[in-house]
Image (cartoon, rainbow, N blue to C red):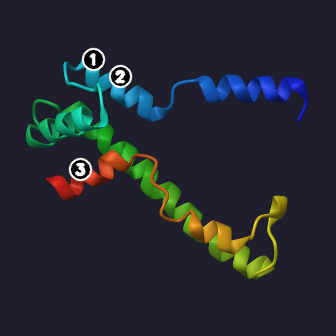
Amino acid sequence: MTEAEKGRLARRLAEPTLWDGFVHVLGEAGLDASSDEAITASLRTVAHDRSAYADLWGLAEALLQHDELASAWRARHVVMVERMIGGKTGTGGSTGAAYLRSRLDLKYYPLLWSLRSAL
């Protein structure tokens, strides 16, 4: 990578994530977002009073859909890789399909997923 590319990547990695934005919105709505436990409690409040927090609930649902669609893409990608190269080494020296399979359970928003079990 060039120095310019490294700088651009470093700046991008320092930017707030979608999750950071969601946590900020929770706080702006007057809900505690100071820790994972506080966020979970706030999300339970949102879930139990969806009429008062319809926008927050909708945003949480949109984030879950984003996560679900990314997961579906990863699953399809594994199958495509297996079809194209089988069990060969993948790009960048990875273990190919084996590595991709190990990433299938990745969740971008684990607190939103765990909330489902807590409701």
At numbered mark 3, what does the secondary structure look like: helix, strand or loop?
A: helix
Residue 7's place in the image compared with 88, above or below, is above
Q: Which residue is drawn at 64% across and 67% down?
A: 100
At numbered mark 2, what does the secondary structure look like: helix, strand or loop?
A: helix
Q: Which mark is first along the chain, 1 or 3?
A: 1
Give the quarter of the image for residue 2.
Answer: top right
Q: Where is residue 24 in the image (x, y as percent from the top left)?
A: 35, 22
At numbered mark 1, what does the secondary structure look like: helix, strand or loop?
A: helix
Q: Position of residue 5 (x, y in %)?
A: 83, 29
Residue 110's place in the image compared with 86, above or below, is above
Left or right position of 16 against 23 = right
Q: Which residue is drawn at 81% across and 72% down?
A: 89
Q: Which mark is first along the chain, 2 or 3?
A: 2
Q: Mark 2 points at which residue?
A: 24
Report how far apart the C-alphas of labels 3 and 1 lie in the structure.
20 Å
Left or right position of 85 against 42 = right
Left or right position of 109 against 116 = right
Residue 28 numbered mark, or none: 1
Quadrant, the N terminus? top right
Report how far apart the C-alphas of labels 1 and 2 lie in the structure.
6 Å
User: CB under 8 Å between callouts 1 and 2?
Assistant: yes
Local crowd size for mark 2, using a 10 Å CA cut-off: few (<14), some (14–19), many (≥20) = some
Depth order, front residue of 37/105: 37
Q: Mark 3 points at which residue?
A: 115
Q: Position of residue 58 (x, y in %)?
A: 27, 39
Give the quarter of the image for residue 29.
Answer: top left
Q: Which residue is drawn at 32% across and 46% down?
A: 111
Local crowd size for mark 1, using a 10 Å CA cut-off: few (<14), some (14–19), many (≥20) = few
Three-letter residue code for mark 3: Leu
Three-letter residue code for mark 1: Glu
